[in-house]
Image (spheres, grey):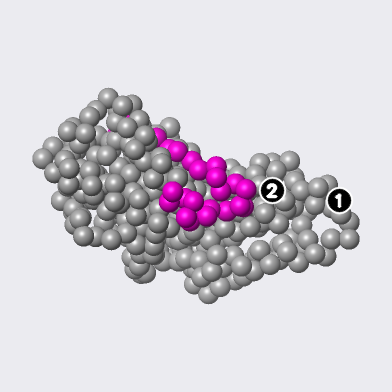
Amino acid sequence: MNLEPVILAIESSCDETSAAVLIGRKVLSNIIAGQTVHEKYGGVVPELASRAHQSNIVPVVHQALTEANLKLPDIDAIAYTRGPGLLGSLMVGSSFAKSLSMTLGTPIIGVNHMQAHILAHFIEGQKHGKTPSFPLLCLTVSGGHTQIVLVRSPSDMKIVGETIDDAAGEAFDKAAKVLGLPYPGGPLVDRHSKDGDSMKYKFTTPRLEGLDYSFSGLKTSLLYFLRDNSKDETFVQQELANICASYQRTLVDYLLLQLEKAAKQQGIAELCIAGGVSANSELRSKFLKMCDNNGWKGYIPDFTYCTDNAGMIGIAAYFKYLNQDFSELSDSPMARIDWGRL
């Protein structure tokens, strides 16, 4: 087998259909097809997502191979997202990958989606040009997950803290929805925040023991705030930027409070953020400032590798390939994966 394997990776955990081709840790192509069908529903509809994946997967894989200037016989292994995610969406990607594996006679590699977000930091050719060292702590924040993960190696990861209810990304999107912003609302909250006073309004966050998170109270705090100001029908429109800025500051500060606590408890000076919410401008800037203030090294992947994409599935598969850690065709996709707490 080649020391630098050629890997075709497929990601279909939620509402993006993505395919990438990698040689070693270098991404040759990373194609992502979004699904606008969910916008009018204010959130991802699982059945519609799986149907869209069925329509998108063949052209997306074809485009990824074309852009990489490679053909299917050049592939050394096929990677796919095994979970966590929407089961119907995962089944589309895993079934396609398994069929291709049987046709080509190439190994197949199932990948943990959340671990792939973390390992995206090890893709070559990113703008920051830096690769973190082990052990490291990674805050993974997305629409479905919020976790602080201790990473000793690509194959040794343990969760040291996680949300006990809602995820940070969901807290952003639900806030956007009650403020009348379209889906997906998280990036719009970030955009409006740039024009607002982040200290104008106060929202509450819980203080849990340990390193876990809870975001349900923050969302409730926003709902009560809007209810108390509902007599003025123009209030939200006039104060949208200030509300977004104040809510975002509260959420970001809470995320980093627990991460800073975890780093000090674990004695680790290599810190990362990953996942879709790591594209948030305030989280990125405050994270780097926190690291600088503590004398830590901070790492953020390029925007392309923050949101769901097959490039990150490919890099996770690369490390598995080096260890000859292949999957079985009988492995089933999993909506939830328990990969252990410290």
Residue type, label 2: Leu
> Would you say 136 lies left or right of 71 here?
right
| Residue 330 on image: x %, y % | 21, 60
Q: Which residue is mark 2?
A: 181
- Extent of the magenta region: 26-51
- Secondary structure at badge 1 equals loop
In magenta segment, residue 32: yes
Report which residue position mark 1 lands on.
234
Quick one: quadrant of the N terminus? top left
- Above or below residue 89? Residue 1 is above
Q: Residue at x 84, y 60 (%)?
A: 230
Is residue 314 one of those drawn in magenta? Answer: no
Q: Which mark is residue 260?
A: none
Q: State the residue at coordinates (86%, 54%).
A: 233
Residue 116 placement (x, y as % from top left): 35, 50
Dot 2 or dot 1, earlier in sequence: 2
- On the picture, is 173 further left or further right than 154? right
Per the image, label 2 sits on a secondary structure element best described as: loop
Instruction: For residue 221, say whether it is visible.
Output: yes
- Residue at 55% over, 65% down: 166
Rendered view: 44 above or below 121: below
Mark 1, other Cα within 10 Å: few <14 / some 14–19 / many ≥20: few
Q: Is residue 189 above or below residue 259?
A: above
Comparing 62 with 149, the one in front is 62
